[in-house]
Every structure is written in C-alpha cells, then in structure tokens.
Amino acid sequence: MKISRPNRITRSYTQSLVAPPEKVMPLLCPVMEAEWIDGWDPVLVLSDSGVVEPGVCLLPMQNRTMPSGL
C-alpha cells in the first residue's frame, strides 16, 4: 500500500449513519479497513495522516493501474 501527500480537488455529499463515530470511523478508513477486510489492498491512499480524515482519497484494488499524472 502506497501512502502519499495529495494534490486535492474537493467534492462533498451528506451521508447519515445511525451509530456513534467511534464505531463508524474505523470502518470507513481506507488504511484501517485492511484490519477487517481480508485481501484489502488499495493501490494508492492520498492522506496527510495515513488514516481517515476529511478529504482522504484512495484508488481501490479493483483498478490496479495508476492513472496518468499520479
């Protein structure tokens, strides 16, 4: 798994989850998901901290080729 500092473009949406943040956030982190999803190995994670944070972006494992410009 490669973790890099990002060049950012911002998009947003609203999602409502019925659970406390401490239960939900680890399930949504592209790095921490590797602890509970067998075989989870995204190609690229763009993150300042390496864990879930506002603006984190990932290139999932379904597409193993890197887009041009990354």
Image (spheres, helix red, strand yellow):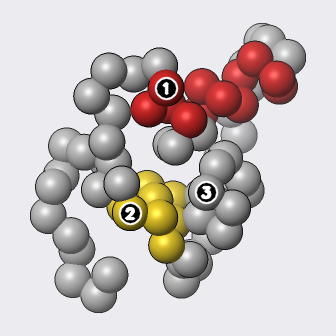
Which of the two discs, 3 and 2, labels the residue nearer the N terminus?
2
Residue at 54 percent across and 83 percent down: it is 7
Per the rendering, the mark at residue 50 is: 3
Res. 46 visible in picture: yes
Q: Quadrant of the N terminus?
A: bottom left
Residue at 66 percent across and 47 percent down: it is 52
Residue holding disc 1: 35
- Horizontal and vertical percent position of residue 67: 22, 74
- Horizontal and vertical percent position of residue 33: 50, 31
SS category of the residue bearing label 2? strand
What's the distance in space between the residues labelled 3 and 1, CA to CA?
14 Å
Q: Amino acid at mark 1?
A: Glu
Image: 36 above or below 29: above
Image side of residue 61 versus residue 49, left or right: left
> Could you say which quadrant of the image residue 39 lies in?
top left
Per the rendering, the mark at residue 2 is: 2
Q: Amino acid at mark 2?
A: Lys
Q: Quadrant of the C terminus?
A: bottom left
Which of the two discs, 3 and 1, labels the residue nearer the N terminus?
1
Which residue appears farthest toward the top when viewing the image? 18
SS category of the residue bearing label 3? loop
